[in-house]
């Protein structure tokens, strides 16, 4: 990472001490550069537009515009930034809201701060960073069997069946490319396939069955 | 004694409110400050480590960091045990699943959850709260006392009642008598008594099966309406 350009980061948290602590911690990492900080969602949105960072790190609860609303704006406007949500609560509604809002990852404030640094690098590299075990729940409809597809996954599968690329699927469904990859990974696991060609074949099998 | 029962239920509701206030205070204060302090100390440590001759100081700092990190883990457990789900609008299956998700997010453990596909939608609020609190405490006990993080959970209906069974393969213990004249007064058993009392307050029951070296099985049975 040291030979390439540093990862440009915007930090947003309404707790001044947290913001200062993270800023100081990041400043000592040669591969990370803090280009702006914000204490509310509105300023964060401005900073993302103005500084075009690689990663936005945001607290969920912030005044004026909370993290999730800001995240929705970022995704709706198609701003090309990876988003890492930091939260003191790892409860299911918070995690679910982050996933559905299009976050690339969640880091917990009750974990050591080095884990937040690691998560910034991982989302910058295009990975999804969620508590591993929690993932399989977040995409599951509680009332159905574990292999039932969510509406999102069905939509993604239909587009795979049409031969669309991840980028095209992202545009059509208003998702980041990472989120599309996230859905694909789960989709493949549920269908028991290992690539998009096999997934497309499954889709056409399903369709045949429904058309008859 | 209907009046006494009513008073106990009112107390339960007030306790819930106060609990949520405490959870929010802990979230807004200590968690943020500890995280901020740890960020600064982590920075300081890496600066010290990069210069030779500072090994003593770096060692002291490492111990300090460990203390703060373990405080954060304790707080995380506390938040995990007492953070309230959306009781009113969530159905009982969602609440159970959400607690399992949270346990997995906070630990490296895995919950194997088997749940009936059809669950009643008219579970009373107090029953939801009681079941949720008992489940949270059970998972927390597994982490703190059984020495494991994995658990198997079964949840569904038996006749007219909700039944939750939580099994772990941890270190197990000799279950103490929880009521009668021999009832345990030991500090480490107060939690178990509290769980049983919660179950009984809403007209249900709780049983503990355990043996040293053979894990623990907690079974809670609650009527849909208290």
Image: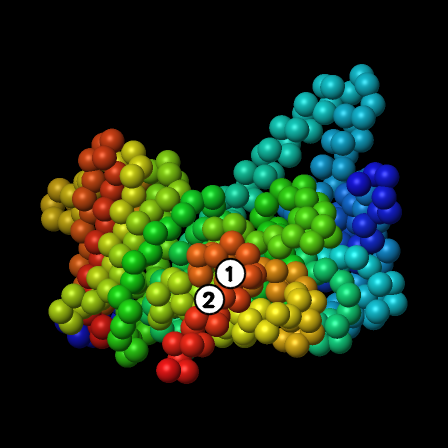
Note whether residue A170 is visible.
no
Between B8 and B155, the residue placed more toward the observer is: B155
Which numbered disc covers residue A198? 1
Which residue is pictured at 30% across the width and 78% down the height? B121
Which residue is pictured at 61% across the width and 60% down the height? A181
Q: Is residue A132 above or below residue A173?
A: above
Quadrant of the rendering where the C terminus of chain B is positioned: bottom left
Q: Is B55 placed left or right of B120 in the picture?
A: right
Q: Residue A191 location in percent, x, y?
A: 44, 61
Say yes or no: labels 1 and 2 on the same chain. yes
Q: Is B149 placed left or right of A178 in the picture?
A: left
Q: Are marks 1 and 2 in contact (CB under 8 Å)?
A: yes
Hey, which quadrant is residue B13 in on the image? Answer: bottom left
Q: Is residue B213 above or below residue A64?
A: above
Which residue is pictured at 81% across the width and 50% down the height? A7
Residue lying at the far bottom of the rendered structure: A211
Quadrant of the rendering where the N terminus of chain B is positioned: bottom left
Residue lying at the far top of the rendered structure: B53
Q: Residue B223 location in percent, x, y?
A: 19, 69
Which residue is pictured at 26% across the width and 75% down the height? B120
Residue tagged 2 = A202
Which numbered disc covers residue B35? none
Number of marks present in the image shown? 2
Q: Secondary structure at mark 2?
A: helix
Q: Residue A169 location in percent, x, y?
A: 64, 71
Between B197 and B94, the residue placed more toward the observer is: B94
Hey, which quadrant is residue B12 in on the image? Answer: bottom left
Note whether residue A165 is visible.
yes
Q: Residues within 10 Å of mark 2 (few under 14, many from 20)?
A: some
């Amino acid at each position: 990472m040291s030979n390439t350009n540093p990862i440009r980061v915007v930090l947003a948290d309404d707790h001044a001490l947290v913001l200062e602590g993270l800023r100081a911690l990041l400043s000592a990492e040669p591969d990370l550069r803090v280009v702006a900080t914000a204490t509310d969602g509105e300023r964060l949105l401005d900073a993302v537009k103005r500084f075009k960072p690689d990663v936005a790190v945001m607290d969920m609860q912030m005044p004026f515009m909370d993290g999730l609303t800001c995240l929705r704006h970022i995704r709706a406007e198609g701003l090309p930034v990876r988003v890492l949500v930091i939260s003191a609560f790892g409860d299911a509604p918070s995690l679910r809201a982050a996933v559905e809002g299009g976050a690339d990852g969640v880091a917990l404030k009750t974990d050591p701060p080095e884990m937040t640094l690691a998560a910034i690098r991982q989302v910058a590299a295009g990975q999804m960073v969620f508590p591993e075990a929690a993932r399989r729940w977040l995409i599951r409809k509680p009332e159905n069997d574990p292999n039932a597809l969510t509406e999102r996954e069905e939509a993604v599968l239909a587009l795979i069946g049409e031969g669309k690329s991840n980028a095209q699927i992202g545009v059509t469904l208003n998702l980041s490319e990472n989120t599309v990859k996230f859905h694909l990974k789960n989709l493949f696991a549920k269908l028991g396939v290992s690539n998009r060609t096999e997934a497309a074949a499954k889709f056409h099998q399903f369709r045949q069955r429904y058309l008859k | 004694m209907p009046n006494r029962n009513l008073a106990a239920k009112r107390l339960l509701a007030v306790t819930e409110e106060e609990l949520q206030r405490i959870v929010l205070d802990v979230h807004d204060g200590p968690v943020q400050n500890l995280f901020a302090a740890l960020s600064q100390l982590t920075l300081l440590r890496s600066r010290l480590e990069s210069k030779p001759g500072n090994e003593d100081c770096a060692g002291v700092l490492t111990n300090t960091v460990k203390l703060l990190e373990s405080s954060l883990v304790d707080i995380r457990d506390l938040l995990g045990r007492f953070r309230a789900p959306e009781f009113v609008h969530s159905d009982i299956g969602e609440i159970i699943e959400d607690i399992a998700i949270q346990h997995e997010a906070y630990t490296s453990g895995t919950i194997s959850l088997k749940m009936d596909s059809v669950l009643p939608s008219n579970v009373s609020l107090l029953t939801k709260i009681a079941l949720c609190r008992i489940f949270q405490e059970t998972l927390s006990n597994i982490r703190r006392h059984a020495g494991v993080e994995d658990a198997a959970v079964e949840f569904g209906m038996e006749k007219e009642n909700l039944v939750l069974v939580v099994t772990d393969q941890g270190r197990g213990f000799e279950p103490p008598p929880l009521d009668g004249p021999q009832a345990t007064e030991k500090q480490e058993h107060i939690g178990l008594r509290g769980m049983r009392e919660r179950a009984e307050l809403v007209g249900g029951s709780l049983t503990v099966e355990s043996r040293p070296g053979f894990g623990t099985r907690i079974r809670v049975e609650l009527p849909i309406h208290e």
